[in-house]
Amino acid sequence: MAMVVGIRPEQIAEYRRLHAQVWPAVLERIRQSNIRNYSIFLREPENLLFGYWEYHGHDFAADMAAMAADPETQRWWTFTAPCQVRLAGTPEGEQWAMMEQVFDLDPQD
């Protein structure tokens, strides 16, 4: 899965600081939601964040709902969301815009 969001240039240092020490409870909730190999990349000067992760669960909607309902994750988002800029076309109620995969070197049959 891949997603993209803008980042406010004046918030890049803060975003880096936050992600240098992600709260243990947030990391555990991500793992409990069956997300693995999660990375976020920064693209400057366009000021974009690109996120990638692999989902290893069986009920994506339920796992994402559990993450969204988690109080510590919600608190984490109060720090990270102000750093970000929603892109045009991002669905209402979502921060990051999901991306469509158009190529896979090693597709799983």
Image (spheres, helix red, strand yellow):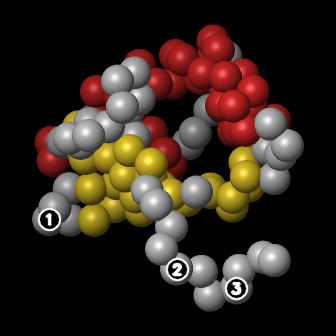
Q: Is 33 placed left or right of 96 in the picture?
A: right
Return the mark for residue 45: 1
Q: Nearer the viewer, mark 1 or mark 2?
A: 2
In front: 73, or 88? 88
Residue tagged 2: 103
The amino acid at mark 1 is Pro
Give the quadrant of residue 104: bottom right
Q: Is 57 placed left or right of 81 in the picture?
A: right
Q: In the rendering, at what x and y percent does residue 2 appear? A: 50, 57
| Most distant residue in the bottom direction | 105
Q: In the rendering, at what x and y percent does residue 26 appear? A: 65, 31
Q: Earlier in the sequence, mark 1 or mark 2?
A: 1
The amino acid at mark 2 is Phe
Q: Is 88 placed left or right of 66 in the picture?
A: left
SS for dot 2: loop
SS for dot 3: loop
Q: How many C-alpha atoms fall within 10 Å of the one at disc 1: few (<14), some, or many (≥20)?
A: few
The amino acid at mark 3 is Asp
Q: Is residue 103 above or below residue 69?
A: below
Give me the C-alpha separation between circle 1 and circle 2. Answer: 25 Å
Give me the C-alpha separation between circle 3 and circle 1. Answer: 31 Å
Residue tagged 3: 106
Q: How many C-alpha atoms fall within 10 Å of the one at disc 3: few (<14), some, or many (≥20)?
A: few
Q: In the rendering, at what x and y percent does residue 27 appear? A: 69, 38
Q: Is residue 81 above or below residue 39?
A: above
Q: Nearer the viewer, mark 3 or mark 1?
A: 3
| Residue at position x 85%, y 43% in the image | 58
In front: 3, or 11? 3
Give me the C-alpha separation between circle 2 and circle 3. Answer: 9 Å
Q: Which quadrant holds the N terminus?
A: bottom right
